[in-house]
Amino acid sequence: MTAPVLIGSEVYRGSTYGAKHPLAIPRVSTTLDLIRALGWHDPARYRDSPQASAAELTRFHTPDYIAALARAEATQQVDPAHRERHRIGADGNPVYREIFRRPATSAGGVLLAARLTARAPGIVHVPGGGTHHGRPDRASGFCYVNDAALGILEWLDQGLTNILYVDIDAHHGDGVEDAFADDARVFTLSVHEAGRWPFTGTDHGPTHANYPLPQGATDTDMLAVLRHAILPLAARLRPQAIMLQCGADAIVEDPLSRLAMSNQAHWAVISALMHAAPRFILLGGGGYNPWSVARCWAGAWGVLNSQTPPARLPPAAEAVLRGLTLNRAAGRNPPEHWFTTLADAPRHGPLLPGTAALLAGAMP
């Protein structure tokens, strides 16, 4: 590949976990619409995501669980035994119309990205990916499959032996860390909010590092972790491939975290890592404010392509953002810059003592 590739799908358009669920909002479809409206869409570098097959999904997940997901989509219900065993229809993981097709498409996109980059080094953006909480035999944290783990396994199957996974979602990337805890070929690093569900990710180990940031952490804190932890680790490991989960829920307007970053912090991490290995896959992840998510992930595609966001969005892009709604407090009176700009103003502050303490012994 000579230029970054974008992988998307129309399966996300109109798909919702339910009206009252945090994932009632459109995210991937809005991101793709915004990229097109900005004139950043090149059909020659766009791939429609395939749907992963049951055989591909069972490279990580159990056959019984994948069968239960497919059955839940076909019947739009789940029996009590499978609800208890697989947490389908429980713990914020509802039965919804595309409960199998949507996560299978997310996984198919990440698998395609891994295959493209295994054959020829390059960069791929998969905003539908990033479902990092999924467990082999159960749904967890709104994630039905673990597409990041599946993508890393594909890289391993292709013969790679030195992979770095970085996760900047507000929630700890527990499913990916646990999947490769005993595999020296994969190192996972997560930067997330301390004390936030799933209440894990507080330690360092031989194959993982965690940086749980205190509430109110700003761009200053993220950039300090980037400078003093992430980049030194990448320099030491010299990985053959990097996968970055770029959940947008660390942005200050997100309703499910108490971090206070701008999208500029996310873009800085992308810019720093995209050429730190021959292969780079950028995933989406969390994010529950549709304006924050779409602006962050569309801007991420701009970073990958050295595009500078316009000071004022063109009318077509502004129309995409004005068409969004959010049935939460943050959506009742959206500020004008959510409609008219892509880049947030940087949000800096003093380095928080909790962050400084984490970095005192930054490298595991």
Image (cartoon, grey):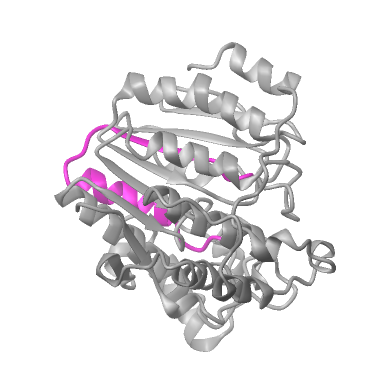
Badge count:
0
Observer-nearest of 240 and 79: 240
Observer-nearest of 137 and 331: 331
Q: Residue at x 70, y 35 (%)?
A: 218
Observer-nearest of 142 and 120: 120
Q: Position of residue 174 (x, y in %)?
A: 54, 42
Q: Residue at x 58, y 59 (%)?
A: 295
Compared to residue 195, the image places residue 146 above or below, namely below
As drawn, is 25 to the left or to the right of 335?
Answer: left
Compared to residue 8, the image places residue 169 above or below, namely above
Looking at the image, which residue sits at the far top?
Answer: 360
Q: Is residue 158 magenta?
A: yes
Q: Position of residue 207 (x, y in %)?
A: 41, 27
Observer-nearest of 19 and 234: 234
Q: Quadrant of residue 88?
A: bottom right
Residues in magenta, as a range: 142-170
Q: Quadrant of residue 63?
A: bottom left
Q: Is residue 49 magenta?
A: no
Looking at the image, which residue sits at the far bottom?
Answer: 75
Q: Is residue 136 visible?
A: no
Compared to residue 222, the image places residue 23 above or below, namely below
As drawn, is 281 to the left or to the right of 286?
Answer: left
Q: Residue at x 49, y 16 (%)?
A: 363
Q: Position of residue 262 (x, y in %)?
A: 65, 44
Q: Is residue 188 visible?
A: yes
Q: Position of residue 80 (x, y in %)?
A: 63, 74
As drawn, is 97 to the left or to the right of 233?
Answer: right
Q: Residue at x 67, y 47 (%)?
A: 251
